[in-house]
Structures are given as C-alpha cells and as structure tokens.
Amino acid sequence: MFVLAGILFLVVYGLLVFYIGWSGWSWMKPVVSARFRWFYIIAIVFLAVSFILARLFGSISFLSVIGSYWLAIFSLLLLILPVIHLTLWLLRLMRIPRHHSQKWAGAVTLVLLLSTMAYGIFNAYSPVVREYSIQIDKKVEGIDSLNIVMAADMHFGLLSGPGHAKRMVEEINLSLI
C-alpha cells in the first residue's frame, strides 16, 4: 500500500512538474535559443529531482536548500499558472494575437513569481514585533506588570536555523526594554 501511494505521488508530482515546465517552454520558445531551452529542461529536471533526493537523503545540505526553494517556486507556480492560462484563454476569445499575449503572460508570470519570492524571503528573515497593552482589572499580589511573548510560524530548519532564532530573541528582548 505504501509503495502504491509513493508511486501515485511521483506520478502526480511528475505531471505537475511537466505542467510547470511546459508552460515555461511554450512562453520562451519564440524568444530564446535552443541551447538555453536545453538548459531549461535540465534545470527543471534537476530542481524536481533535488526536492525528492533532499527528502530521501537529508544529509546533503545543498540539495536540501535547493529543494526547499524549489518547493516554494513549485507551490507559487501552481497558484499563478492556472490564473495566467485562464487569462490567456479569455484573451484568445477577444481575438488578441497569441504571440503577443504569450510573451506578456510569460513576463507577468516571472514578475509575479520573483516579487512573491522576494517578499516571502524578506518576511522570513525580518521578524515583526508587535506590542499590545492589555488592562486586566484583576490584581495579583507582588506583580505590577507582566510581559507575555508569543512567537509564531517560525519554520526553523535548514534555511532559518539557530542564527535566525538568536536574532528573533534579541529583537524581542530589545522590545521589552
């Protein structure tokens, strides 16, 4: 049963990677050279395989970093590409030339992907400290004030490890002063 589930996962994952790869291929086909298209195919295969290999052999750190970023790119493209393809289909109904709309679709996809990735990376490494003052009428003997700290959604791991945790603690401590 476990083997069948693994095979099913690989088939679905492979089809989704093909969908992403095919979308990029069709948008860059009229613009770039054949040599770059081969590089693109090899890069997509490497990224897809690095994600799987990083999960199987977690001790290879560079594959884990590449696989982690690939997972983010993969997830974002699975959200962006269907919207772009639907928009392209609607534009075809309005008789806009296919060549122009495909070039723009590729550019819009790339800009959305890169800007979303940059925003996510910035937020991941820039902790936000918010202070709230709450007045509680109940008095406790010996306590005049109480500081409560909550930290959420850290995802500590390979990309944000002990250094990230230390910066977060330092920033929290500075806000309590």
Image: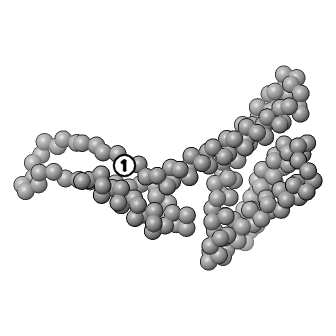
Q: Position of residue 165 (x, y in %)?
A: 42, 63
Residue 21 visible in the picture: yes
Q: Position of residue 121 (x, y in %)?
A: 56, 52
Q: Residue at x 6, y 55 (%)?
A: 141
Residue nearest the viewer, comparing 167 with 56: 167
Say which residue label 1 marks: 129
How many marks are shown on the rendered structure?
1
Residue nearest the viewer, comparing 158 with 48: 158
Point out the residue furthest to the left here. Answer: 141
Q: Residue at x 62, y 73 (%)?
A: 61
- Compared to 141, does 162 lie above or below? below
Mark 1 Cα shell of 10 Å, populated few (<14), some (14-19), many (≥20):
some
Looking at the figure, which quarter contains the N terminus?
bottom right
Q: Residue at x 66, y 46 (%)?
A: 114
Q: In the picture provided, is 76 more to the left or to the right than 4?
A: left
Q: Position of residue 89 (x, y in %)?
A: 82, 31
